[in-house]
Amino acid sequence: MFYQIHTYTELQQQIHDDLRIQHPEWVKSNGECPTCDSYESRLREMLGALTRTGSNATRSK
């Protein structure tokens, strides 16, 4: 199903939900999902690095 994403928070929630739907075997019986948490953390790190790189490129112009 297609959902239009408008904010970073919505994107995070969509990824959170989709990982759990696509990989139910990753979700523990208590609802925790360490693998999902790891993916989400890596995405935040990558986006943060891109944001910092983008802001540095803007300053150097």
Image (cartoon, helix red, strand yellow):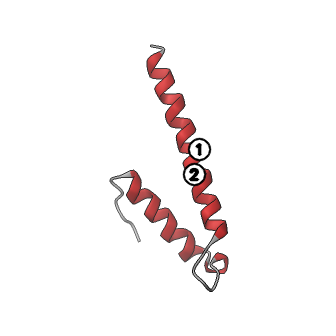
Which corner quadrant of the image does residue 1 belong to? bottom left
Residue 26: image x %, image y %?
A: 66, 75
Taking the spot 45% from the left edge, 64% from the top edge, the residue there is 14
In the rendered image, which residue does mark 1 sit on? Answer: 46
Secondary structure category for the residue under label 2? helix
Q: Which mark is residue 43?
A: 2
Taking the spot 56% from the left edge, 69% from the top edge, the residue there is 19
Q: Are marks 1 and 2 in contact (CB under 8 Å)?
A: yes
Check the image and report above or below for 23 versus 41: below
Callout 1: 10 Å neighbours few (<14), some, many (20+)?
few
Residue 5: image x %, image y %?
A: 36, 57
Taking the spot 64% from the left edge, 60% from the top edge, the residue there is 38
Residue 34 left/right relative to 4: right
**Residue type pointed to by label 1:** Met
**Residue type pointed to by label 2:** Leu
Callout 2: 10 Å neighbours few (<14), some, many (20+)?
some
